[in-house]
Image: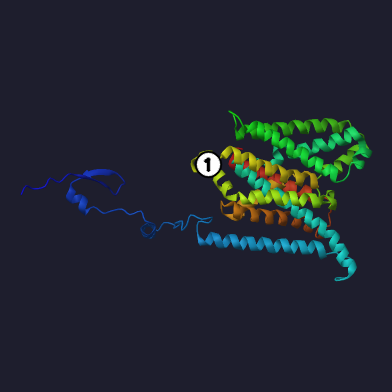
Amino acid sequence: MAERTRTPQRVLSAQGQRRLVPAEEAALAPTISTSPADLVEELETLGAPQRVRTSAGAFPDARSRRRYWIILGALAVLAVGFGAGLLAIDNPMPAGSRGFWLIAEMRATSLVVMAVVAFCQSIATITFMTVTNNRIITPSIMGFESLYTVIQTTAVYVLGVAGVVALQGTGQFLLQVLAMVGLSVLLYGWLLRGKYANIQVMLLVGIIIGGGMGAVSTFMQRLLSPSEFDVLSARLFGSVTNASSEYLPYAIPMVLVAGALIWANARRLNVISLGRDVCINVGVDHGRQTIYMLVLVSILMAVSTALVGPMTFFGFLVATLTFQLAGTHDHRRLLPIGVLTGFVVLAGAYFVMNHVFYAQGVVSIIIELVGGTVFLVVIMRKGRL
């Protein structure tokens, strides 16, 4: 019987290079396994740090999952603590009396406003950063604050102080929200549809429009009388005291509906964060979902800005802290952390300034200072927008 011809085979050498060897050597050559268990053994042999992902879920390992729940619990405790402190500390009436609860009820309105603002700013900024795939640009920087400034400045410039006071109420609040949402929808529909639809162009145009509106506002402010300028300045500082309790029955339903719709599409946000090509491959309409999410973001930002005024870097500060604390890409986990972080930052700032330093009225300035500093640090570290 004729001897069977043995053909040479390719094996992987120790240096990672392929070479041709006779069949006898190939049979004796060590096989290389890529299974997770064998990889762990190899890492132990080499003394390398082990980090083998155990699942394809929201967290890479059990340690990250425990860390997430610990942070979530700590934020919840801080939120309850700051809320109770703002309600009870420095209450002049005896605890448990009718006067005590009346004062606590008045303070509770401010807490509800803080919760609404934290909800709007955190969810809107996180969603906006995900959709635009940019951790620097926020809806406030895009021009929402400038639009609010233009509306307020124009009202004082055209109608005067008496006219602005006469327009106070839910009508003015709803009109501001409608104007902000309408202009943002026009911007998104114009720049995100058609042959040359591009997220980066939208961001650039939004920043330019915001700068232009800021320049127009500054020009009109120079033409105001001192008394009119004082009234306008009070409106242009973001403060919880700017909100009226009569706005809340309209603001809360709009915010809850927009937030619930974003939460219902959290899985699509996870896909959108991977890029346009991945969305197309898995059957997600990237353009349509992007416009849909940005419209919901505009509703949240419009309600927040019309309620308390401009807070340019608050959303950026909260979103940056959320991405650092959550340790996950899953928006179903990111959004709760973001809302709690926003409330802790806002309520904690008011608590510290009011009850530690007794410096009421400067809370928004401190938040903007810290948020702006974090913004500059992030830009310096990344080196680009």
**Is residue 350 rendered to the left or right of residue 35?**
right
Q: Nearer the viewer, residue 319 or 155?
A: 155
**Count of picture labels:** 1
Q: Residue furthest left?
A: 1
Estimate the x, y position of residue 361 in percent, counting from the top left.
Answer: 84, 51
Estimate the x, y position of residue 295 in percent, counting from the top left.
Answer: 68, 41
Q: In which quarter of the view is residue 349 placed?
A: bottom right
Q: Is residue 93 visible?
A: no
Q: Is residue 11 visible?
A: yes
What residue lies at 91% left-to-right and 35% top-to-bottom?
A: 159
**Is residue 34 rendered to the left or right of residue 359?**
left
Q: Is residue 222 above or below residue 83?
A: above
Q: What element does badge 1 sit on?
A: helix
Q: Which residue is mark 1?
A: 279
Q: In which quarter of the view is residue 230 placed?
A: top right
How is the structure coloured here? rainbow
Q: Nearer the viewer, residue 266 or 198?
A: 266
Residue type at mark 1? Answer: Cys
Q: Residue furthest top?
A: 195
**Is residue 35 rendered to the left or right of residue 350?**
left
Q: Nearer the viewer, residue 88 or 261?
A: 261
What residue lies at 87% left-to-right and 40% top-to-bottom?
A: 232
Q: Quadrant of the C terminus?
A: top right
Mark 1: few, some, or many residues within 10 Å (few <14, many ≥20)? some
Estimate the x, y position of residue 182 in percent, counting from the top left.
Answer: 74, 37
What residue lies at 26% left-to-right and 54% top-to-bottom?
A: 30
What residue lies at 59% left-to-right and 37% top-to-bottom?
A: 287
Estimate the x, y position of residue 102 in percent, counting from the top left.
Answer: 88, 64
